[in-house]
Amino acid sequence: MGLRPSTTHGEQSTTPPPSARRGLAQRALGHFPKSRAARVFVLIAFVDAFGRGFFLAGSMLFYTQVIGLSTAQVGLGLSIAGLFGVACAIPTGWLADRFGDGPTLIALQLWRAAAFLVYPFVDDFHMFLVVACLVGAVEQAVGPIIQSVAGATAEEGSPVGAMALIAVARNAAYALSAVIATVVITMASSGTYVGFVLANAAAFLATAALLPRLRLPRRGSREAKQPGGSGSKLLPFKNARFLLLSMANGILYLHVPILSVAFPLWIVTHTDAPRGLIGAALVVNTVLAVALQVRLSKGGDDMAHAGRKQRAAGLMLALFCVLTAATASMGALTAGLLLLLASVPLTLGELWQSAGGWGISYRLSPEVQRTYYLSVYQLGATGMTVAGPALLSIAVVNTGATGWLGLGAVFALTGLAVPLLARPTELPAPANTAPTD
């Protein structure tokens, strides 16, 4: 959760200038954890994101110039693969609770590596669809397991702080891989684009080799490991508050398709701002995310504080929408400056949404079913990952300033509602029991 970029749709890579890259590295090293397990998992997260980011930077070139697909075929195939991911995420989370997060994550990484090793042999749309669905089937399942493992390796008992460090490592890896991929794309021929695929597969294999070094403690009870044991698999779906919080988190998670789809579309089609502003906004987003993620995540382990962080996220995202809407009738220079300014509240909204979502989901997830509950909570964000690009394009960008103001109102109301939903109605449940309705 909150680990960019999205794995269901195409992404745009960020390429910060050298000074910004040095700042990213210094920030990452300054927050490096002290415990061995936490350090290993940060390294795993970095390697995984580096391989993934490197592939994403050149994926469209591989799909279109090596396999020979049209952009429409690529979009259709990845959308279908995304739906497979939605369907498989929750069952995979349940399996992780039964067999352990470590073994399950190793299996998923090996699965992804095998699928990407098949990609170079794909030569038509039907084979592409099969392989894309094999990859997509496990993509959405990885996030909740990463969150659960981060909590297990957390220093000072702060799962949210651990997730913040993971997010910093991943964002830094995405930025670095984008720089290297840009150089490769500039200098290489189309025949070398297979290297993007093989590098991603190698990263998955490397992380699978590193994961046993975590030595994660066994979690769960005998009852939790028995399939269908006490009907406990239905508990999160019977908890209206849990589902509403998942839905609210999903609405706030729209910042992901806004940054990758709606914001660039708006700049190109509805303003006179220079198109290079898209890359500048992505650089601002990446640098601020690395610099502020840990700081803005502090206190997120407390349920009330987590709710207030999501309230702040909703208000910041609403402010972004208001600023963006105002650029429709401005000149190029003024619109460009305002859009660049708008990228700041967009990023702050992203960081507070992530921290609040991690804290709420972890607090409401009983220990023996943690990954399963986290997978259910992720449904809101996953749904918006799949539906968000089309929804934002049609209902917001095509509608103009009115669409942005309407979206801003939705963000503000959602943010204000989260602290009310997150407020405990009774004494918190013990860590090894399920939350009650």
Image (cartoon, helix red, strand yellow):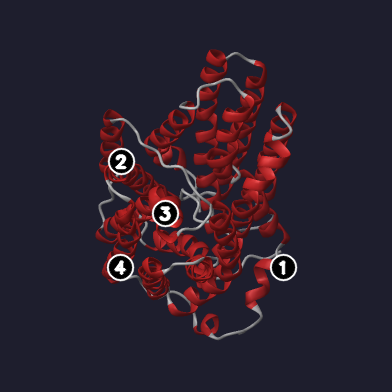
Residue 431: x %, y % from top left? 52, 65
Q: Which mark is residue 186?
A: 2
Badge 2 element: helix
Q: Which mark is residue 65?
A: 3
**Mark positioned earlier in the residue sequence (3 or 2):** 3
Residue 329: x %, y % from top left? 67, 17
Residue at 30% from the left image edge and 58% from the top image edge: 195
**Mark positioned earlier in the residue sequence (1 or 4):** 4
Q: Nearer the viewer, residue 68 or 273?
A: 68
* Label 1–label 2 contact, CB within 8 A: no
Residue type at the position of mark 3: Gln
Residue 85: x %, y % from top left? 56, 65
Q: Nearer the viewer, mark 2 or mark 4?
A: 2
Q: Nearer the viewer, mark 1 or mark 3?
A: 3
The residue carrying mark 4 is: 205
**Mark positioned earlier in the residue sequence (4 or 3):** 3
**275 lies left or right of 424:** left
Badge 3 element: helix
**42 lies left or right of 351:** left
Residue at 53% from the left image edge and 56% from the top image edge: 74
